[in-house]
Image (spheres, grey):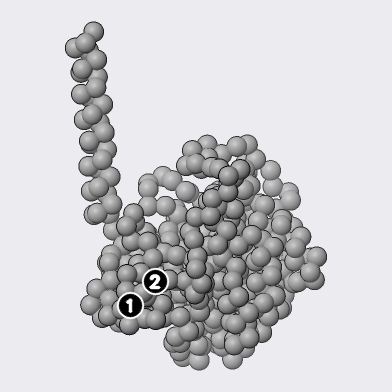
Amino acid sequence: MFLVLRKVLKYLLWCVLFLALTSVLFINFSPTFGSKPSGDSLEKIKLSKNFNGEQFVNILPTEVSTPVADNKFSIIDFFNPPAGKNPEQALPANAFDSTTLKNDEFVWFGHSTVLVKTDDVTVLVDPVFYKASPVPFTVQPFTMQVKHSIDDLPEIDVVLISHDHYDHLDYQAIKELNAKVKHFLVPLGIKAHLLGWGVANEKITELDWYSEYAYESVNFTLTPSRHFSGRGITDRFSTLWGSWVVQSKSLNMYFSGDSGYFDEFKKIGDQFGPFDIAFIENGAYNANWSQIHMLPEESVQASIDLGAKVFFPIHWGKFDLSIHAWDEPVIRAHKAATAKGINIATPLVGEVFTATTYPSNEWWLSIK
């Protein structure tokens, strides 16, 4: 009996060592984790007033974790969600014909991925078309009636990245997009990831908060958000995060990226607004993340602060990233926006719309 137990323990030990070694090798050598800034990029980081010498910092003190005693959850909750938490049927979606996209039209591809054309410049924001995790076969998109891919997209002039978390910066999508994208605009430090994935140096511009870049007639400004960054275990806060203001002759747009609520929304609105439309994070929230993600009611207030004529809730409807039901974010946002008299756009994934003609129907109510 003792010899059998000894063999079993020895076998288990070897299994643990194998898994540990495999994990270390995966984290250190898998390209999906990205690369560390170096050279000119690192020098720009050191000169940033938003870098304290060791890491990037938020405008005001911010905690990533704000634990609430009666709001506990674990990784098991993500892999074993309760009934009704996620859609049990394919979500409705429209097919998209890129050849028909006109100036000042938008398309939402779920979560925070938005396509827009304005002044004949085509812009894609936070392109995520695959999983939202570095671990294979995890955090997959919900099933859609129409599954969109990189092939559905037109040639892209500018790709905007808000930060380097997996649900906003998709390694596989960037690899496939590279050939059809003319330029990438990213917060400080993210250039290293793109270079490591094969994007040419001359195609990437890094910006600090309130820095601007003009592409033809369209102006892009990286504005602050209240969040954090990191793709690995030890690189948290090593790259900058932010939101985007996009201004053309005919449109003034805002994309929040990920953010907790803060007074900077009002400052951005006063400086760059009013906005024709604001795409604002509204999902994957939790009381335990209260300073880095907004509740839906806060997202609506942010749209007011920004002076947005139309509020578009993003960061929901594609991935299971928190403990709330998949449709809770939009239900709460729609209720709060309606109560405050705020225009809210809620198109289907893949549906073409504008800042003046947009659907606001509650299509999620018919989904089981």
Front residue of this view, candidates 185 and 158 = 185
Number of other residues with Cα within 10 Å of mark 1, as a class: few under 14, some 14 to 19, many 20 or more: many
- Can residue 331 be spotted in the picture? yes
Give SS at disc 2. Answer: loop
Of mark 1 and mark 2, the one earlier in the sequence is 1
* Relative horizontal placement of residue 226, taking residue 7 as reference (left or right): right
Q: Amino acid at mark 1?
A: Ile
- Which residue is drawn at the image coordinates 58% and 77% (left, top)? 264
Which residue bears the numbered disc 1? 45
- Can residue 99 be spotted in the picture? no
Q: Amino acid at mark 2?
A: Phe
Front residue of this view, candidates 201 and 323 = 323
| 269 versus 169 height, above or below | below
> Pointer 1 and pointer 2: residues touching (CB < 8 Å)?
yes
- Which residue is drawn at the image coordinates 67% and 77% (left, top)? 305
Give SS at disc 1. Answer: helix
Q: Position of residue 62 (x, y in %)?
A: 50, 65
Q: Position of residue 193 (x, y in %)?
A: 32, 67
**Which of the 4 image quarters holds residue 49?**
bottom left
* Relative horizontal placement of residue 137, taking residue 80 as reference (left or right): left
Q: Quadrant of the N terminus?
A: top left
Q: Which mark is residue 73?
A: none
CA separation in Å, label 1 and label 2: 9 Å
* Relative horizontal placement of residue 261, taking residue 217 as reference (left or right): right
Which residue bears the numbered disc 2? 56
